[in-house]
Amino acid sequence: MENEAHKRIKKLLAKEYAGFVLITCKSPSASGQMQVEMSYEGDPVLASYLLEGAQGYLDEEEKGLGMELLS
């Protein structure tokens, strides 16, 4: 079930963008569980491409951080 903030952001993005992937999460509960929501708009192939691109970006950032820690 989408929370209100997720719905509002999704509606705003849909006005301007042909496609997007929206992933949100709330702070962890006392038991450590997090409520995560994901939705996308547009072509599923485009959504997949956006996710793959984001994963590549995060992987590169992680590599860079690892190199900084070794320096």
Image (tube, rainbow, N blue to C red):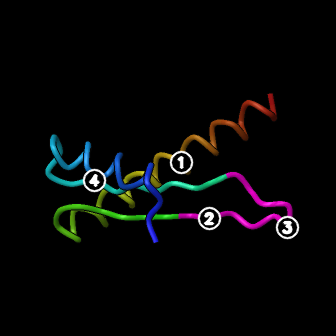
Decide which of 36, 49 is in the foreground and name it: 36
Q: Which residue is mark 1?
A: 58
What is the number of callouts on the image? 4
Q: Is residue 31 magenta?
A: yes
Residue lying farthest to the front in this orientation: 4
Which residue corresponds to mark 4? 20
Q: Nearer the viewer, mark 1 or mark 4?
A: 4
Name the amino acid type tagged 2. Answer: Gln
Mark 3–mark 1 Cα distance, whole angstroms, equals 27 Å
**Image check: 17 left or right of 62?**
left
> On the rendered image, what quadrant is the C terminus found in?
top right
At label 2, counting other C-alpha atoms closer than 10 Å, the crowd grade (few under 14, some 14-19, many 20 or more) is few
Mark 2 lies on residue: 35
Identify the amino acid type marked 1.
Answer: Leu
Contact flag, marks 3 and 2 (Cβ < 8 Å): no
Mark 3 highlights which residue? 31
Specify which label sits upstream in the sequence, 1 or 2.
2
- Which contiguous range is marked in magenta? 27-36
Q: Amino acid at mark 4?
A: Phe
Residue 62 in the figure: left or right of residue 23: right
Q: CA distance from mark 1 to mark 4?
A: 17 Å
User: What residue appears at the point 34 percent right and 48 percent down from the top-left corner?
Assistant: 8
